Amino acid sequence: MKAFLTVLILLMGLGFPPALSQTLGPVVPKATGNPHPEGNLFMRINHSKLLLQDRNLTVRLGDRNIGASLKACVACHTSTDKNGQPIPINADKQFCSVCHEYVSAKIDCFQCHATVPEKKTEAFLIPKTSDSNALAAYLKETSE
Amino acid sequence: MSCSLKNGSELPALKFNKKPTEMGRREFMRSGAALATITLAPGVTLMAFGGKAEANANPATRWGLLVDTNKCTPDCDACVTACSTENGWKDTGHPETDAQWIRKVDLVDLATGRETSLPVMCQHCENPPCVDVCPTGASFKRADGIVLVDKHICIGCRYCMMACPYKARSFVHEPLTGQKSYAPRGIGTVESCTLCVHRVDSGRIPACVEACDAIGHRALIFGDMNDPESDIAKRLLAYPSLALRDDLGLNPGVRYTSL
């Protein structure tokens, strides 16, 4: 390992293009939305565990107010094509597939789960029970 | 922040409010129905059931559906269409293997010729046979009485389909695309009516009930059967109602009047 790193550093020192470091790993498409406060490294390591925990909270207990849902991943991490249409997140070179393909990990999440976000009007207008007062106030305001 | 995970217990929750940070299957099963949050170590708690504001499946609630067959007409399938649109299932052209979330059943009394029409879906039994026979625990009943399939651990054995006296479950035979984000469904798993659990959890009513109301029939009433003030509880008290295959003692959450 040490030898490999030495060679690598040497090679880079010898004037190889800086793009070399990018071609070594998967090129992950950029996401929209705010960055994860936990940091990308934390998410790279722990996203499967977080998803596993929160899926149980939702499926078994009906807790919809969770931090890590696949729906939320898809909402921010899908790219759009040149017509502005979302590209399925599990398509080639897209957010989920790019790393999983790189490490030969086969995931079956998207046999069942939606690969593109729900239309914004639907996904973001579903009132939460806790938000019902705010929503009622908003509706009253808009109807006046 | 440390990224190393020794036995997974250092995983911080992503939630901003206090949540259990780790739930293994064993802890989940062991925690029991009325257990409060138990602190194992700082930041590590067992899953708590019941009495938690965040959990929408409230054990004091029993969601139910009352079908007034007098108001249901044979030529109307608004509830079926609404279910299909909401949950994203459609007929595949193979009736033997089509999804069976909800269907209309027409009955004719041969002696009198009287026709009765009614929707039949998962009856959300109190003692569900599908849950009894499931070898993996995928088929389960939520604290509020909604019977669901946890497709993450469903192995597609279809035992539950055989056990269900209402034929309310079906198996997804073919690969699917374009599912709804709130209603995941896919190949190799069993599915059935979820009582629109994603809507119920956000304080709305199931799509079939909404459609029946919208068309003006108002044959479907959804509500909490345990709440004496609810419309459904009042009607169940005031009028005679019937459970399909009452002889089996399953105590379904779906009941029928004028049948």
Image (spheres, rainbow, N blue to C red):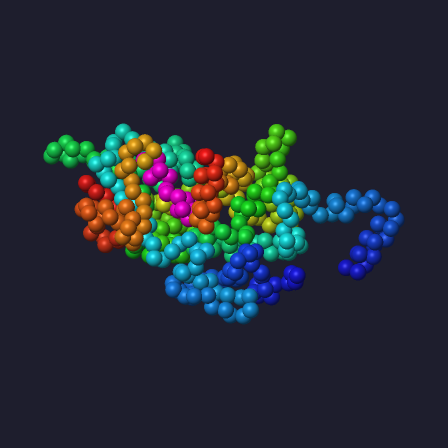
Q: Residue furthest front?
A: A144
Q: Quadrant of the N terminus of chain A?
A: bottom right
- Residue sitting at 37 percent across and 39 percent down? B207
- The relative height of residue B165 versus residue B211 in the rendered view (above or below) is below
Residue B110: x percent and y percent? 14, 34
Left or right of residue B38: residue A101: right
Q: Residue furthest left?
A: B111
Residue B182: x percent and y percent? 47, 43
Residue B91: x percent and y percent? 39, 34
Question: What residue span does the magenta drawing correspond to?
Answer: B198-212
Q: Residue furthest bottom?
A: B41
Q: Nearer the viewer, residue B132 or B83?
A: B83
- Residue sitting at 66 percent across and 42 percent down? A29
Asked which quadrant contains residue A7, the reply is bottom right
* Residue B168 magenta: no
Dominant secondary structure (helix, strand or loop) of the stretch shown in magenta: helix
Q: How many marks?
A: 0
Q: Nearer the viewer, residue B258 or A20?
A: B258
**Residue A99 is at least partly visible in this image:** yes
- Residue sitting at 62 percent across and 33 percent down? A81
Residue A141: x percent and y percent? 47, 38
Q: Nearer the viewer, residue B226 or A46?
A: B226
- Residue sitting at 51 percent across and 41 percent down? A124
**Residue B242 is at least partly visible in this image:** no
* Residue B201 magenta: yes
Q: Nearer the viewer, residue B259 or B39?
A: B39
Left or right of residue A113: residue A100: right
Left or right of residue A113: residue A45: right
